[in-house]
Amino acid sequence: MAQIKNRFTDEVIAEGDTVHEAAENNRANLDRANLDWARLNGANLDSANLDWASLAGANLDRANLDSANLDWANLDRANLDGANLNRASLNGAKGVVMSGTSPRGYSHWAWIKSGAIVYRAGCREFHSADDYRAFYSAAGYAESHGALSAAVSLALCEMNIDLAGKLLDKKSWT
């Protein structure tokens, strides 16, 4: 039986046969949970409360964290490959930055993976600032999505690049 405990008091806040099962509860309240190095790949944590939770080194590959509360959560070294953080709240979160949400509803965020910045906008992932910037500044994007949407997305892209650079400067993944 796997248990998830409050990272400050050690109180058991969720149980299941596996950590994945214990955590995969739509709208789960995992406030202050210690999920360091947990395997939560593919977990559905839609609208979960992970406020102040520690997810350092957790595998969140393809996890659904849509609208989750990750305020002040520790995401250092977490695997966020393919994770859905659309509409998630990341105020004060460690190890990840978010510049905002585009008019089309796509969140722009970034994290550190193996010492390099990975940028994400909706379901698109970019491994360089140049590729990220080029995608949103291409004429075809403005033509197919509208000038306003393109301008806002490019502005979010630039803010995200700036924020991610600060994240990399902090070397929070070490």
Image (spheres, helix red, strand yellow):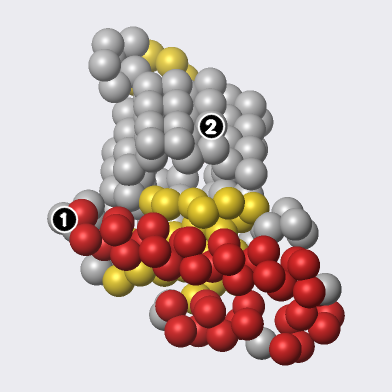
Q: Earlier in the sequence, mark 1 or mark 2?
A: 2
Please say if 84 is above or below 151.
above
Q: Does residue 24 appear anywhere in the picture?
A: no
Point 58% across, 41% down: residue: 88
Please say if 111 is above or below 134.
above
The answer to which quarter of the image holds residue 19 is: top left
The answer to which quarter of the image holds residue 163 is: bottom left
Point 57% across, 25% down: residue: 28
Q: Does residue 8 appear anywhere in the picture?
A: yes
Say left or right for 166 vs 101.
Answer: left
Q: Residues within 10 Å of mark 1 (few under 14, many from 20)?
A: few
The answer to which quarter of the image holds residue 161 is: bottom left
Q: Which residue is mark 2?
A: 69
Residue 11 x/y as whole percent: 33, 10
In front of the other: 162 or 64: 162
Say left or right for 62 vs 142.
Answer: left
Residue 89 x/y as whole percent: 54, 37
Q: Amino acid at mark 2?
A: Asn
Quarter placement of the C terminus: bottom left
Q: Amino acid at mark 1?
A: Thr
Residue 132 x/y as whole percent: 52, 78
In front of the other: 24 or 74: 74
- Name the element at disc 1: loop
Quarter placement of the N terminus: top left
Say left or right for 111 vs 138.
Answer: left
Q: Which residue is mark 1?
A: 174
Q: CA distance from mark 1 to mark 2?
A: 24 Å
| Residue at the extreme bottom | 139
Point 77% across, 67% down: residue: 148
The image's mark for residue 38 is: none
- Name the element at disc 2: loop
Q: Residues within 10 Å of mark 2 (few under 14, many from 20)?
A: many
